[in-house]
Amino acid sequence: MAEVLNVPVTLTAGAIKELRRLINEEGFDNTQHLRIGVKGGGCSGMTYVLGFDQKQEGDEEFEIDGIPCVMNKSHGIYLMGMEVDWQGGLNSRGFTFSNPNASKTCGCGTSFAV
């Protein structure tokens, strides 16, 4: 049985609805998990990672409202308590990140510093 950890991030109802829409599209690889993480780069030093991927060594598994998720164990310190939302409006469209650990964020909302 996979290790169950406290869910480090939350997804809003809008994000869950959009992720389920993507998962239910024809041809989606159901062996993939939602990967939530960070990588170096972006205008503030780190960029968020959100996409579908295979589980890798060093990942922790968790589930949010039936959506299987993975995160590299070392990313938790940057993302604990973060909320992911989906904006579907005409002026702003896409996933947004609200991270209490970020000391500063950039204008695009996808980059941050700790």
Image: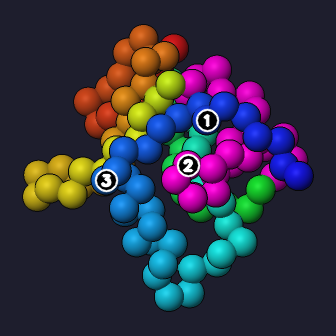
Circle 3 sits on which residue? 14
Is residue 40 shown to the viewer in this render? no
Instruction: Give the percent coordinates (x, y) of residue 113.
Output: 47, 18
Marks 2/1 in contact by CB < 8 Å: the verdict is yes
Q: How many marks?
A: 3
In the picture, measured across the screen, residue 111 lies left or right of residue 96, that is right
The numbered disc on residue 64 is 2
Q: CA distance from mark 2 to mark 1?
A: 7 Å
Q: CA distance from mark 3 to mark 2?
A: 13 Å
Other residues around mark 1 within 10 Å, as few (<14) / some (14–19) / many (≥20):
some
Circle 1 sits on which residue? 7
Instruction: Give the percent coordinates (x, y) of residue 77.
Output: 64, 20
> Which amino acid type is shown beneath numbered disc 1?
Val
Secondary element at image label 1: loop
Q: Residue at x 11, y 58 (%)?
A: 90
> Which amino acid type is shown beneath numbered disc 2?
Ile
Q: Residue at x 45, y 67 (%)?
A: 20
